[in-house]
Amino acid sequence: MPRITAATNAAQRAETQRRILTAFGELLFTHGLPGLTMTDVARHAGVGRTAVYNYYADMEQLLIAYALDETERFIVDLRDSLAALENPVDRLALYVRAQVEDLSRRHLPPGPAMAAVLSPGSFAKLADHVGDLNVLLQDILQDGVEQGYLPDTDVAQLARLIHGTLSASAARRNRTPDGGTPPPPPASDVELHTAAEVHTAIELHTTQTVRFIQLGAGARFDEAGKPVRLDSPAHDALAS
């Protein structure tokens, strides 16, 4: 059992639960979900297997708890970042970039695949929570329409298309060519060099995804790459 480090029992329970969720997330990143067990999580968290079961009855409960926790924290951080930007096209770029990076980091199954992993009740809990993200994206798109940066469209349908694109992109990126999960973080100088190249490739992919979705939503840019209103004389000058 873990050594008592927190001041109160409640704080200790919260600390233990955080360690379990953190360990689960790290194992998802290095090993993926298939074959992962509660024993693996307990060992990685440095707690007894019984301690894990005190919080989560099975892997499904642990998975949904992790997904909900990550989504809630992601939404809070994203809202704070979006509040610093005024232009809705820039906010769309930030939203897409944040989603790409988050989906890559967490290595959770994308939306449709989660439905196959979770029971209907658990998937419904996750869907309700993720609905907050959908509302956030729709608000960005609606602002873009109202301010003249995006064409008038069905923002609910467009939001679904954008999320579908992001999920499909994450599913492809989080697999090696043979269909397996990515290798663990590099340890040697050679691996670090390779990791730098991978990081550059991911950054290029992210940038391309952002611009692809912005253009797909109907955004237009001037020669400097800044968003322009659709009624602007420069609206036909697209940045590459």
Image (cartoon, rainbow, N blue to C red):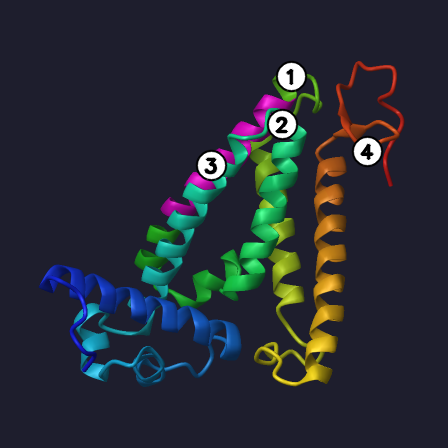
The magenta segment: 128-144
Q: Earlier in the sequence, mark 3 or mark 1?
A: 3
- Pick the quarter of the image with the N terminus: bottom left
Judged from the image, the secondary structure of the residue bearing numbered disc 2 is: helix
Task: Name the residue tied to disc 3.
Answer: 80
User: Which of the 4 quarters of the picture holds residue 119?
Assistant: bottom left
Which secondary structure lies at badge 3? helix
Nearer to us: label 4 or label 2: 4
Alpha-carbon span between mark 4 and mark 3: 24 Å
Instruction: Point out which mark residue 225 bears.
Output: 4
Depicted 25 relative to depicted 203: above or below: below
Instruction: Name which residue lies at 69% across and 17% down.
Output: 148
Q: Check residue 147 in the rendering and tell me which mark sits there, or answer none.
A: 1
Instruction: Report whether residue 24 is seen.
Output: yes
Q: Earlier in the sequence, mark 4 or mark 3?
A: 3
Q: Are marks 3 and 1 in contact (CB under 8 Å)?
A: no
Name which residue type carries label 3: Asp
Q: Please indicate whether residue 73 sits to the left or right of residue 5 in the image.
A: right
